[in-house]
């Protein structure tokens, strides 16, 4: 439970907010990726986007570095590929476990009978 008294709230400047909004409006960029890269909650960024649309948050938006937008797109692509690899890895682990269990159950002929064979 929170402590009584004044709350500590991070205050962000108008330039920061407008830059974040402009970055989030770039094609192919997700709000959650922008928020994560700026260490803010996605809800906060959505709130700022709404304020810009409604005219509450106004100002000249600073120029956004195209490299940072490209990096956000690349980050999103890498995360999607990583999730796919994780799923494939888990599937392969299950397949290996299944195959080894199946082999252990169905191959009694591969076990030795206890009689040594003689070679001449």
Image (spheres, helix red, strand yellow):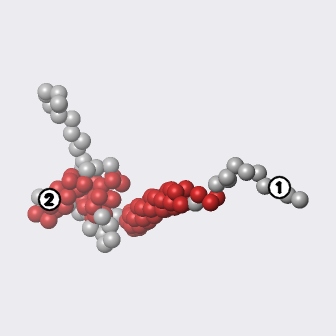
Where is residue 70? Give x, y as percent.
41, 67
Q: Quadrant of the N terminus?
A: top left
Residue indicated by mark 2? 51
Residue 19: x %, y % from top left: 29, 59
Relative to 20, is 65 on the left or the right?
right
Q: Which residue is mark 1?
A: 118
Mark 1 Cα-neighbour bin, 10 Å: few <14, some 14–19, many ≥20: few
Q: Residue at image x 25%, y 50%?
A: 41
Identified at 76% across, 51% down, the residue is 116
The residue shown at (17%, 27%) is 3
Give the image quarter of residue 81: bottom left
Which picture quadrant has residue 45? bottom left
Residue 117 image offset from top left, x and y in percent: 78, 55
**Which element carries disc 1, helix, strand or loop?**
loop
Given the current orientation, which residue lies at the most extreme bottom position? 27
Q: Is residue 10 left or right of residue 77?
A: left
Q: Secondary structure at mark 2?
A: helix
Task: Tell me the quarter of the picture where residue 107 sits.
Answer: bottom right
Indicate whether 41 appears above or below 99: above
Label located before the other in sequence (1 or 2): 2
- Label 2 packing within 10 angstroms: few (<14), some (14-19), many (20+): some
What quarter of the picture does the C terminus occupy? bottom right
Q: Nearer the viewer, residue 78 or 13?
A: 78
Residue 67 visible in the displayed image: no
């Amino acid at each position: 439970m929170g402590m009584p008294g004044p709350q500590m709230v991070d205050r962000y400047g108008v330039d920061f907010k407008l830059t974040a909004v402009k970055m989030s409006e770039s094609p192919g960029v997700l709000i959650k990726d922008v928020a994560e890269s700026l260490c803010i909650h996605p809800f906060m960024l959505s709130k700022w986007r709404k304020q810009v649309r409604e005219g509450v948050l106004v100002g000249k938006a600073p120029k956004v570095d195209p490299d940072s937008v490209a990096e956000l797109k690349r980050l999103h692509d890498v995360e999607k590929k990583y999730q796919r690899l994780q799923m494939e890895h888990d599937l392969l682990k299950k397949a290996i476990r299944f195959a080894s269990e199946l082999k252990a159950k169905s191959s009694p002929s591969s076990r030795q009978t206890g009689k040594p064979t003689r070679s001449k």
